[in-house]
Amino acid sequence: MIIVDWIKHIINLATYPWWSVTLSIVVLFWAINSPKPWSKRGGIVMGLGAILFFALSLLDPNFRSVATYPDNVPIVGMLGLVGFTVWFSMNQAYENDRRIAAGLPTIEQEDSNKKVFTWPDLVYAELVALVLTTAILIVWSIYLKAPLEEPANPTSSPNPAKAPWYFLGLQEILVYYDPWMAGVLLPGMIVNGLQAIPYIDTNPKGNGYFTWKERKWEIGAFLFGFLILWVLLIFIGTFLRGPNWNFFGPYEYWDATKLVPLNNVNLSEFFWVKWVGSSLPTFWLKREALGLVLCAAYLFALPPLLAQTILRRFYLKMGVVRFMIGVNLLQFMASLPIKMYLRWLFNLKYIVYIPEFFFNI
């Protein structure tokens, strides 16, 4: 039991966001550059390992109370489906890369020659899927109680008060950004960025077939944004955020009396009070000059530098306008983990803090 408790303690520490995000980034970029995890044997090993880990973890009462909560059961299933989908796509991508290198047709080109009739082949398959889905939903509704609560009561708020699962990523972003950024600007950039991708990325390679070798930068950026900055944030908000929005490991008891002292400091306070040793200036422009300069350098000076260094081949291929738009979208995506690490490492709350105009970054 001592060994088991130590293992639980290590897992609890490893799942705290500053470790879980870092480990997830390292594992992701190691895995996508290695064919072993995406082979059939690798998929079986990862799948069985995840099932075994989940089954053993259910023996812990704290883990079981969170994982089997009716609101959270669909999230557990969603994580499994996301994992399988990513494995399947990368498995196909590495297989196609092998075929292209050997001068063979891709999997999609071979499948394009296999034609079936809508009736009865497609309709029959859809009917079977309909019957199975209906049966699963009936059994689910019988054995899993609907998470209905009492009527809304302004004097009794749930602790923690959580958004629906598909907004938990945004709710987690609210910890690090002001509402206007976390709830309006960043989601708007995501939607506009997705719409702009076909016009920014005109590379015909990878259209209609899976590939990794021909689309490394694009697939790596997508998986980072989707898995790390969306799915992982939903996981953290669902399973690791407990009462008072505190972090709890998967085997920790959700103690409503847990207090975590926070001393978040703005960059202007770091500069004027701690480094210069004076009081904060009253004029907002002078007070926040350092933060404004850093933000301007990040948004406007960094893209030309990247265009002449590590992203030069993209600049030459895409041109000035498409390159600048694409890099700015990537910068907004990268700003989230940068802000998260600044909060975790230095308790930095805002880089720019101008309450006079409700403008905080």
Image (cartoon, rainbow, N blue to C red):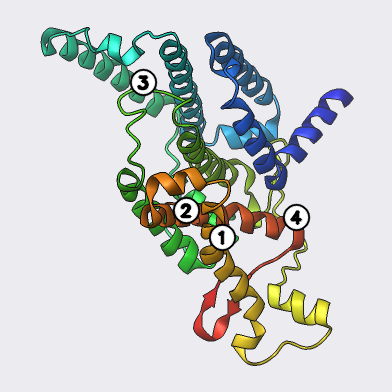
The amino acid marked with disc number 1 is Leu
Tag 1 near tag 2, CB within 8 Å: yes
Rendered view: 305 above or below 165:
below
From the image, tell me which residue sits under label 4.
258
Label annotation for residue 302: 1
Query: What is the three-letter code of the residue carrying label 4?
Result: Lys
Residue for point 22% across, 17% down: 126
Q: Which amino acid, by three-letter code, is at mark 2?
A: Val
Q: If you read the primary sequence from the N terminus, does the residue marked by circle 1 or circle 4 appear first? A: 4
**Dot 2 lies on which element?**
helix
Disc 3 target residue: 136
Q: Amino acid at mark 3?
A: Ile
Residue at disc 3, secondary structure: helix
Q: Position of residue 237 (x, y in %)?
A: 57, 47
Residue at the spot 56% in from the left edge and 32% down from the top edge: 68
* Left or right relative to 351: residue 126: left
Checking the image for residue 228, the label placed there is none
Q: Extreme bottom residue here? A: 282
Q: How busy is the neighbourhood of tag 4: few (under 14 within 10 Å), some, or many (20 plus)? A: few
Assign the C terminus to one quadrant of the image. Answer: bottom right
Alpha-carbon span between mark 4 and mark 3: 39 Å
Please give the residue where the numbered disc 2 appears in the rendered image.
Answer: 327
Q: Earlier in the sequence, mark 4 or mark 3?
A: 3
Residue 176 visible in the picture: yes
Look at the picture and state if 211 lies above or below 218: above
Q: Nearer the viewer, residue 192 or 204?
A: 204
Q: Earlier in the sequence, mark 1 or mark 3?
A: 3
Residue at disc 4, secondary structure: loop
Left or right, 196 with reference to 45:
left
Q: Earlier along the polypeptide chain: callout 2 or callout 4?
A: 4
